[in-house]
Image (tube, grey):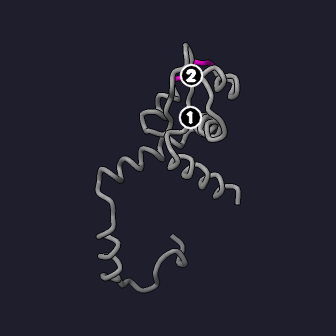
């Protein structure tokens, strides 16, 4: 480790540590958040989320857009749905997908903004 990456003098600010400890989410909340970020760690799923951030689309549309088979897209959508990142509605024989709620849109938009800066 480089010298400028650590404190030169070891001193734990107990009051600050305790204040943050009081606000720290519980184990299961942290685990759920880690799972969401793990789910977001796949480029195909990022493409799907970007598409759905802009427009509700059916599986056929998404498959054509990202040039993958419908079964591969359906698999990725199941993963996203399991994390409550996307939802679907049936219209006749088609399933139309969209982002699950505004939180997902904000999370994705902020991540995109962060990497574009």
Q: Check disc 1 and report the residue beneath it.
A: 98
**x 31%, y 70%: residue:** 21
Q: Which residues fall within the magenta stretch?
A: 69-74
The answer to whether residue 34 is above or below residue 62 is: below
x then y, percent, for residue 103: 50, 50
Q: Nearer the viewer, residue 56 or 109?
A: 56
Q: How many marks?
A: 2
The answer to whether residue 10 is above or below residue 55 is: below
Say if mark 2 contacts mark 1, CB within 8 Å.
no
Q: Is residue 103 visible?
A: yes
Q: Check disc 2 and report the residue beneath it.
A: 72
Name the front one of labels 2 and 1.
1
- The secondary structure that dominates the magenta segment is helix
Q: Nearer the viewer, residue 39 or 110?
A: 110
x then y, percent, for residue 79: 47, 32
x then y, percent, for residue 104: 52, 46
């Amino acid at each position: 480790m480089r010298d400028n990456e650590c404190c030169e003098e070891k001193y734990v600010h107990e009051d600050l540590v305790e204040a943050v400890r009081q606000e720290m989410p519980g184990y299961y909340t942290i685990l759920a958040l880690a799972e969401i970020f793990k789910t977001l760690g796949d480029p195909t799923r990022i493409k799907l989320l970007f598409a759905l951030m802009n427009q509700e689309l059916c599986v056929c549309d998404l498959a054509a857009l990202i040039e993958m088979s419908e079964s591969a897209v359906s698999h990725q959508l199941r993963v996203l749905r399991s994390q409550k990142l996307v939802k679907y509605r049936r219209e006749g024989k088609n399933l139309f997908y969209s982002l699950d709620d505004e939180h997902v849109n904000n999370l994705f938009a902020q991540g995109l903004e962060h990497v574009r800066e």
